[in-house]
Amino acid sequence: MSKQADFFIYLIERYAENKKTTAQKVLEQWDSLDLTNLIYDMYELYHVERLENAFDDIDELVSQKQG
């Protein structure tokens, strides 16, 4: 597995934990909002910053998509 894939799994699991839900539910939400690939592709930025910063960015992306 690539470093990017490993980090994505780590990110989604920590994000789900932070939101008190499951990684499966988070992935379903991201898929439904067409955000999964975008978040996956943000590896270069997200893996070098604090996870909380990535969470804040993801929350903003979700909020924008939900309108």
Image (cartoon, rainbow, N blue to C red):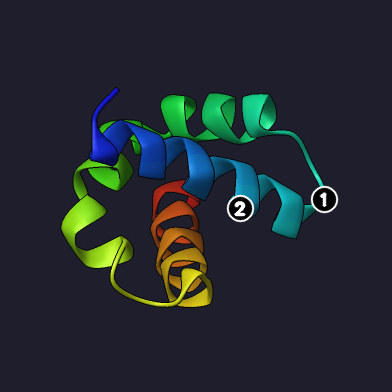
At x 44% / y 59%, what residue is drawn? 58
Please tell me the numbered disc located at residue 15: 2
Q: Which part of the image, by quadrant, shows the N terminus?
A: top left
At x 22% / y 65%, what residue is drawn? 45
Give coordinates of residue 25: x percent, y percent.
67, 29
Give coordinates of residue 42: x percent, y percent.
23, 53
Please tell me the numbered disc located at residue 46: none
Give coordinates of residue 14: x percent, y percent.
62, 52
In this rendering, is residue 49 above or below 19?
A: below
In this rendering, is residue 11 above or below 48?
A: above
Nearest the viewer among 25 and 4 is 4
Amino acid carrying mark 2 in the image: Tyr
* Between discs 1 and 2, the one toward the N terminus: 2
Task: Looking at this view, name the residue that lies furthest to the right.
Answer: 20
Give coordinates of residue 21: x percent, y percent.
79, 41
- Residue 41 quadrant: top left
From the viewer's perspective, tell me whether residue 8 is left or right of residue 45: right
SS of the residue at dot 2? helix
Nearest the viewer among 23 and 4 is 4
At x 34% / y 38%, what residue is drawn? 35
Nearest the viewer among 64 and 46 is 46
- Real-space CA distance between mark 1 and mark 2, rounded to the nearest whole angstrom: 9 Å
